[in-house]
Image: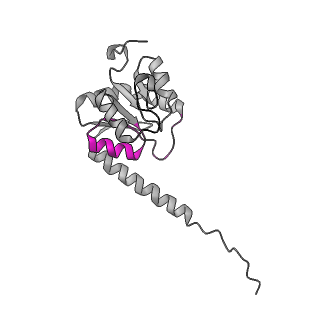
Amino acid sequence: MLPDDPKLGYSAMRFLWDEQLSHQVPRALRVLGLNTTHVGNEADGAPARGSSDLDIIDFAAQTKQIIVTSNHDMMLLCAEASQRFVWLDPRGKQLSRVEQTLLVFRQIHRWDSILSGGSDACVRSMRTKCESISPLEAARLTGQRMRSLQKRHRVKKKTPLGPLVEDDD
C-alpha cells in the first residue's frame, strides 16, 4: 500500500463510505493509497450492511473516520451528532462508480484542507466544485432537497392518465 502522505499526494484523512455508495470505489481508492473503507467491510471492523445510521456514526466517531455519503437522512444525523462528513451532492443525478472515483481524485486535497481546518466543517462535493459547509447549512439544504424530491414525486403520481372510458354520446 502507498503511504498516507499529503506531500506525496495522498490524504492522511480516514474515510468511511456509506453503504448507499458503491463499495467498489473505496476499495479501489484504498489500493491506490487512500485510507478508505466502507460499511459492510467487516474485515476492517466496519459495521455490517444494513446497520443503523446511528451505529455507523458511532463507529466513525470511535475510529476517527469521516463519513462519505449522499444519503440525506445520514447527513441530518451526522449534523446532529457533530460527526464530520463529505456530502457527495450530484444535484439530483446519481454518480457512477467512475464519476465517484474521479471526483475524489480531483477534490481530495480540498477535502483535506476543509476538514483539517475546523472540527465542525463538512464538505459539499459536487461535480464541478467542492466547498466547506456547516452542519446546520447541510441540514437546511438537505431538508430543502428532500422537500423538493417529495414534491416532484407527488407531481408524478398526480399526472392524469386521460379518460379511462370514452363517452359515446
In the picture, measured across the screen, residue 107 lies left or right of residue 132, that is right
The quarter of the picture where the N terminus appears is: top left
**In the image, which residues are magenta?**
69-96
**Residue at the image position 46 percent from the left and 58 percent from the top:** 150
Outermost residue toward the left in this view: 118
Tell whether position 112 is magenta.
no
Give the quarter of the figure containing the C terminus: bottom right
Residue 17 place in picture, x, y as percent: 42, 32
Where 78 sits versus 112, above or below? Answer: below
The colour scheme applied to this rendered structure is one colour
Residue 27 coordinates in the image, percent (x, y): 48, 23
Query: Which residue: 22% across, 32% down?
Result: 118
- Residue 99 x/y as whole percent: 51, 32
The number of numbered badges drawn on the structure is 0
**In this view, 18 is above or below 159:** above
Residue in the picture at 58% in, 66% down: 159
Residue 134 makes an appearance in the image: no
The location of residue 63, given as percent across then percent down, is 31, 26
Vertical comparison of 55 with 166: above or below: above
Q: From this viewpoint, which residue is outermost toward the right?
A: 168
Q: Is residue 103 left or right of residue 164?
A: left
Quarter location, residue 161: bottom right
Considering only vertical position in the picture, is 151 above or below 21? Answer: below
Please identify the quarter of the rendering in which residue 108 is found.
top left
Tell me if residue 3 can be seen. Answer: yes
Q: Quarter-wise, where is residue 127 in the image?
A: top left
For image coordinates 33% across by 17% down, the residue present is 6
